[in-house]
Image (tube, helix red, strand yellow):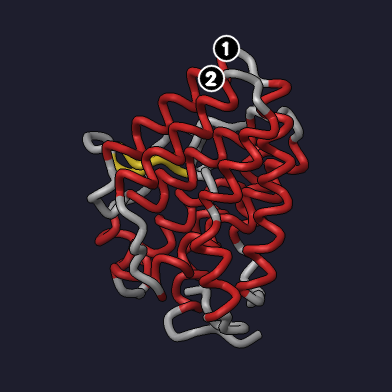
Amino acid sequence: MNYAPGHSQVEEVLKYIKEQLYSGRLQPGERLPAERRLAEKLGVGRAHVRTAFQKLEFYGIVQTFPQSGTVVARETMQVLERMIADALQIQPYDFASLVYVRELLETEALRLCARNRTEEDLAIIEEALSAWEDSFVTDDRVSKDFAYHQALARGAHNSVIASLLLVITPDVLRYYQRYRVCSVPLEEVCYEHRELLRCVRERDEEGCVAMLQRHLKSIREFSRTNNQENHFLE
């Protein structure tokens, strides 16, 4: 398999963490080793360790806290094993196809979320939205954006759709961030995110679909005019 520059080192870090989890030396809820320490242990650059940690966070395998560092998600090992297997899927994709499939899946996810969401789901979605708004001007913006959309997907209570979005959405967001500086004003993006939540809260399925189509318009148009097949992962 062909890797982009530095990809094999990122994969080495991911596989090391997977082995630590599978062996029981690293447990859900425990903190990952510091970037510098892990880089020295594996003989890779700190930038590659950081990229691996970011990918793990994209997929919900770890969470980063200001005072606690990077911590393994408190999921069962069975769930973590599936999530790690997803994160290690590094085959290249056609970006336009990824965007198309994301829109198909997320459209249905939002319909179901508006129909099936609970009060607990709403609280989780609201918390994710607040976290995204608080991090918009930071390096965490993309991961928090993903977390918000994933919270909406989980509110659908269809684990297959949520899992599929978990696999493809991080690559969509990462590619978009890397190759295009988003020109949509912050106020507009915030409005669209809040309107998605409002429609879910009011169980407005068609409103959810209409707002999602508006929200994804720029990335849809970008994918059609700037599609670069293959080699856009790390």
Q: Which mark is residue 122?
A: 2
- Give neighbour class at mark 1: few <14, some 14-19, many 20+ (Cα, 10 Å): few
The spot of residue 14 in percent (x, y) is 51, 61
Q: Is residue 211 above or below residue 49?
A: above
Q: Is residue 108 above or below residue 103?
A: above
Tell me which residue sits at (55%, 69%) in the image.
Answer: 221
Instruction: Give the structural element (helix, strand or loop) at label 1.
Output: helix
- Kindly indicate whether the residue at mark 1 contacts the one at mark 2 (C-beta within 8 angstroms): yes
Q: Which mark is residue 56?
A: none
Locate residue 86: give its quadrant.
bottom right
Task: Judge from the rendering whether residue 105 lies leftward or rightward of residue 153; answer left or right.
Answer: right
- Give neighbour class at mark 2: few <14, some 14-19, many 20+ (Cα, 10 Å): some
Camera-side residue: 163 or 118?
Answer: 118
Q: Tag 2: residue type?
A: Leu
The residues tagged by marks 2 and 1 sit, at their Cα atoms, a distance apart of 5 Å
Q: Is residue 25 above or below residue 124?
A: below
Instruction: Give the structural element (helix, strand or loop) at label 2.
Output: helix
Task: Judge from the rendering whether residue 48 lies leftward or rightward of residue 8; answer left or right.
Answer: left
Task: Judge from the rendering whether residue 56 lies leftward or rightward of residue 142; answer left or right.
Answer: right
Tell me which residue sits at (55%, 83%) in the image.
Answer: 231
Q: Tag 1: residue type?
A: Glu
Residue on which disc 1 sits = 119
Tell me which residue sits at (61%, 73%) in the image.
Answer: 95
